[in-house]
Each structure stands twice: as C-alpha cells, then as structure tokens.
Image (cartoon, rainbow, N blue to C red):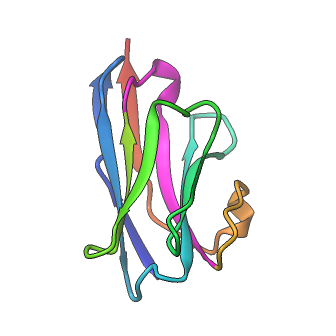
Amino acid sequence: VQLQASGGGLVQAGGSLRLSCAASGRTFSSYTVAWFRQAAGKEREFVAALRWSGGSTNHADSVKGRFTISRDNAKNTVYLQMNSLKTEDTAVYYCAARAGVAVPPTPTLYSYWGQGTQVTVSS
C-alpha cells in the first residue's frame, strides 16, 4: 500500500484545514487508517484512526470535538477535517495504515506510512 498525504499549509489560529490520505496499490477495505503528528523536537503522537470495515473511529483527547476523521469509499481516501486549529496543532501530519480491524494509537503498530504534510498554525 502506498499512501499519499496532502492538504497541509499555513493557517491562522481558529481556522480550518482538511488533510487527505489517498491509497494506491490496493484498497483500504481491510485496513485501519490513522493520522499521527510530530511536532519539532517531540515524539510522534496519535491523532485519529478509522477502521475501514464498519467505519468506527478513535480520536485523541487533544483533538476531540475539533478534528474528525472520515473516509470516501469511492476515492479510497481518508480525510482529517481540522477545525478550531490551535498553535499547538503545528506539526508534520502523517497518515498510516495497518491490516486488520484493531484501531491502536501506537505508531509502531502501523506498517505503511505516507510522506507527511506540514501544518502550521499561526497566532
């Protein structure tokens, strides 16, 4: 599975962005897809995940109510809608995928990674 993340950019605090993660090589149908982020000098952290089969989701407490992970079956794409952005959301955002139905928040459990897209939130 090859993953292509896009949609990052520079936005003011309070603004919105939508990230996309498109898959090629195979469909997401039996996979869990997640977003992680890594700020400068910090460890990679879980943001949200979606189990393609059934569509159940999991969001980190730090983004609940502001970020929403979703999917487009026809486009084989996962989105991360980010609203009410804060300066502390500034990071490189990565999409990742793993085979199976578990929705773990641990990056080492994901086998496939996209290249990352920079999100910068200014005050």
In reply to whether residue 93 is colored magenta, the answer given is: yes
Q: Is residue 57 above or below residue 102?
A: above
Work out which residue is located at the far bottom of the displayed protein and give it: 26
Q: Position of residue 120 (x, y in %)?
A: 38, 30
Work out which residue is located at the far front of the displayed protein and give it: 54
Q: Position of residue 68 (x, y in %)?
A: 44, 44
Q: Is residue 16 above or below residue 117?
A: above
Task: Name the residue rendered at 67%, 36% in the picture.
Answer: 42
Task: Name the residue rendered at 26%, 76% in the picture.
Answer: 74
Q: Position of residue 95 (x, y in %)?
A: 49, 59
Task: Kindly tell me whether residue 8 is visible in this rendering.
Answer: no
Q: Is residue 98 above or below residue 13?
A: below
Task: Name the residue rendered at 71%, 60% in the picture.
Answer: 104
* Image: magenta residue range: 83-99
Q: Quadrant of residue 45?
A: top right
Report the side of 72 relative to 91 (left or right).
Answer: left
Task: Kindly tell me whether residue 47 is visible in this rendering.
Answer: yes
Q: Quadrant of residue 118?
A: top left
